[in-house]
Amino acid sequence: MSAPPNEPGGADAAVLPAPVSLRRATHLRAPGGLKARLALLGPAFVACIAYVDPGNFATNIAGGSKYGYMLLWVLLAANLMAMLIQNLSAKIGIATGHNLPELARMHFSRPVTWGLWVQAELIAMATDLAEFVGAAIALNLLFNIPLLPSGIITAFVAFAILGLQSKGYRRFELAIIGFLAVILLGFLYDTLKIGFDAGDAAKGFVPHFDGSDSILLATGILGATVMPHVIYLHSALTQNRVVPRDDDERRLLLRFNRVDVTIAMTVAGLINMSMLIIAASLFYTSGGSDVDTIEKAHAGFNELVGPSAGVAFALALLASGFASSSVGTYAGQVVMQGFIARTVPIALRRAVTMAPALIVLAIGVDPTKALVISQVVLSFGIPFALVPLVLLTRRKDIMGSLVNRQLTTVVAALVAVVISALNIFLLVDTFGLVKV
């Protein structure tokens, strides 16, 4: 292991960007016009790529093909939760100059901190499973490359994207935004090509379930939408991006970040909803409820709509896998550096966390089922990121003038309770103790 972060010789310098002030950035209150303001946008777009990763493809397609528009309300609720959570994560970095794992190490006991770190590493493996398997499926669909070599190709591409950090955080952010644009355009094309019944879709925003299987899938959708690792990451993306001189500048910076989060999470939400709407319109209404894999969905696009729709879908999946895998690596470094003040070479870290994904690809496990299960696993990690976030952002001695309002803390706590309750139900139902 290397030296702790932020010390001379610390290995994190190659991963985490330096403060903007060290790059002779324009001061917050200096006149800069639209260009200067746009330069403040970006962290939320990096975070939001995790909200449209390949796990979302699997859960949304499964939800739409099996239950039609019924689970649209779950996506809407999850997206609203994501906006709140990512705003709190961004705020903690702005207010304190530290990221969430660092603050946990500073304010929680050592056993708690190490426990949080261990579960975060397990969650990182589940995250990698979704990202690598998704990109591998896309390469297989587009170029007929076998799944295992496709997974290895994904690893090299992820390193190349992350390497843009060495040339400045802005290039990395723009690359991620470019991938997000590919995903958005792919689903916009397919939505316009396929069409849907707006009246039937609107009914999907009325909360209801249809048995325990729908709750299992809803939990997977929640796990795919609210991602634990980017709760940690977003705080690192904002902690030193701009160094404010006083509370007025912190509040100004926070307002810019709220705009950043709102735009980015809205885009992610629209993409997720379009996935489910397309699956419901194309497969559920035509009796194709057995379309429960990404491969079957791609075949359905080709057969029912045309090859261009299939290519758009596969390209969106490929962009999602490439971008989210690089963001996942970034988040993994933040987690280790923050919780235990240590880091390992990125190549070694990536080899460990991507091992389960490559094993799944090598032994021939159904990749889409693996994706859905990985999202359920991810949903169990959300409370372990969210509870510390709520506990820390409610403390004035930590947050100063940016401390949560009481209503914000109550709503965030309620979100944590709802997610935890869903996970408890999932455990009980999985072991056959309840029947719905």
Image (cartoon, grey):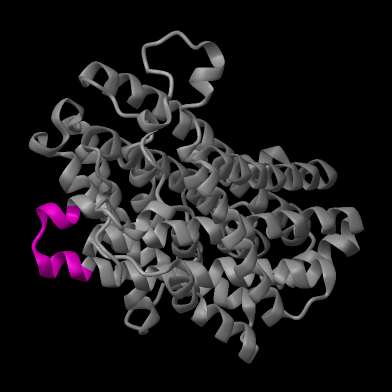
How many labels sit on residues? 0
The answer to whether residue 250 is above or below residue 326 is: above
Left or right of residue 71, residue 235 in this image: left
User: Which quadrant is the C terminus positioned in?
Assistant: bottom left
Residue 416 placement (x, y as % from top left): 27, 53
Q: Residue 354 vs residue 292: left or right?
A: left
Name the residue: 47% across, 31% down.
260
Q: Is residue 258 left or right of residue 337?
A: right
- Location of residue 110 in the rendering, given as x and y in whole percent from the top left corner: 11, 66
Instruction: Tell whether 75 sits left or right of 191.
Output: left
Q: Residue at x 36, y 12 (%)?
A: 29
Q: What stretch is highlighted in magenta?
A: 104-115
Residue drawn at point x = 60 percent, y = 54 percent: 161
- At a point 53% along the width and 37% down the height, the residue shown is 170
Which residue lies most toward the bottom here?
Answer: 363
Residue 296 on image: x %, y %:
76, 71
Give x and y (percent) for residue 246: 21, 20
Quadrant of the rendered image containing residue 418:
bottom left
Among the 4 quarters of the image, the one containing residue 200 = top right
316 relative to 65, above or below: above
Residue 68 position (above or below residue 119): above
Of residue 369 and residue 256, the one placed in the foreground of this image is 256
